[in-house]
Image (cartoon, rainbow, N blue to C red):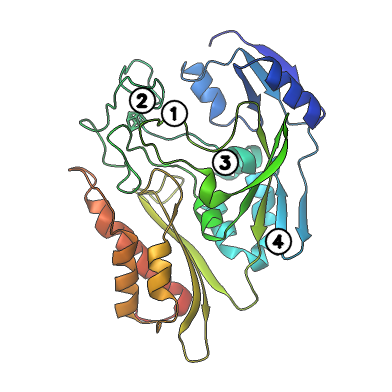
Amino acid sequence: MRPFTYVRAHEVGTALAEAEADSRADFLAGGTTQLDLMKDGVLRPDRLIDITRLPLHGIEERQGALIVGALVTMEELAADPVAGRRLPLVREALLRSASVQLRNMATIGGNLLQRTRCRYFRDPTVAACNKRDRGSGCAAVHGSHRTHAVLGTSEHCIATHASDVAVTLVALDAVVHISGAAGDRKVPLTGFYRTPGDTPDVENDLRPGELIAAVEIPLLPEGARSDYLKVRDRSSYEFALASAAVAVGLGADRRIEWARVGLGGVATVPWRAVEAEAVLTGSPADGEVFASAAAAAVAGAEPRPQNAFKVDLAQRTLVRTLQTVTGAGS
Ligand code: SF4
């Protein structure tokens, strides 16, 4: 591993000042993926700022939302009683993400910023990876890309975003609270992530030296129906080939009054399927509507030879989740 300077911050202001002083500094929290990437030479910070002692550990219910500190662990959020009752799809996504050992280390802030599992990104002996080295090329486009994205891609990068919980949070209109030396700001998670375009190395809206302080998750209304379904190659602790986060309000006449839909495992960012929501809203909860919504969700897909199956898999995953939450059409 490349040598680096380690510092521990106890206040947010101190951490931001340390980051501002060194453009090659990184923050360290759970470190579950970050340290692997450093050992492999993919990440090479000059300075590592340990932020685990910052006062960003709380979970607070406030004005119809859950404010989750960035350093809350995945396990702590999964065990939170309000999250369990009012955000069951978030809890499901957390439990499906990782082993309990990892959930006890990994933080919510870190989860939102986790890096892609693309094998070429993680192997510095492969020269062509635009996400690691801008302009170097993309080994996956003509290489192994079975697990890669079909939505939000570009010719420069087709890597999927790895987070399960981010898919649910995008669907729920969560908001990221960001702290920086220039001040604090809030960004809707739907606008936080960047599709690759011709700069795949720029993955989100964070500016140099900024850190995620919290994520604000609007609670589902009482009576809402929701679920997160993850389809993967093996049943334990694997990344999604396709996943669906769904929340709906169902009227007494069994019409869908409102719908929130997110897709994972098939896109370069946690994917909000607004086209599917438009089909569902105001429609009866039946198989025909679900199939139309699923087709709308993947209408812009650009599959490649090895991952074309994901277009169908994503639709099946979404239809199954809609059947589960509405109890219709199965
Ligand atoms: Fe790199 Fe993205 Fe191509 Fe993977 S898909 S090799 S991360 S540029």
Q: Amino acid at mark 1?
A: Asp
Residue 23: name its quadrant: top right
Q: Which mark is residue 111?
A: 3
Query: Which element type, helix, strand or loop, lies under badge 2?
Result: loop
The answer to whether marks 2 and 1 mark residues whose Cβ atoms lie closer than 8 Å is: yes
Q: Is residue 248 left or right of residue 81?
A: left
Q: Splitting the image into four quadrants, where does ligand 1 fall?
A: top left
Residue 216 position in % (x across, y down): 67, 53
**Callout 1: 10 Å neighbours few (<14), some, many (20+)?**
some
Assess mark 3: CB under 8 A from ligand 1?
Answer: no
Q: Nearer the viewer, mark 1 or mark 4?
A: 1
Mark 3, other Cα within 10 Å: few <14 / some 14–19 / many ≥20: many
- Give the numbered dot on residue 92: none
The residue lying at 24 percent from left, 46 percent from top is 307
Say whether marks 1 and 4 touch (CB < 8 Å). Answer: no
Q: Which residue is mark 1?
A: 201
Q: In the rendered structure, which amino acid carries the disc numbered 3?
A: Asn
Which numbered dot is residue 65?
4
Where disc 1 sits, the SS reads loop
* 3 or 4: tag closer to the N-terminus: 4
Q: What whole-number distance in Å separates the C-alpha atoms at marks 1 and 3?
A: 18 Å
Judge depth for marks 3 and 4 and give the one in front.
4
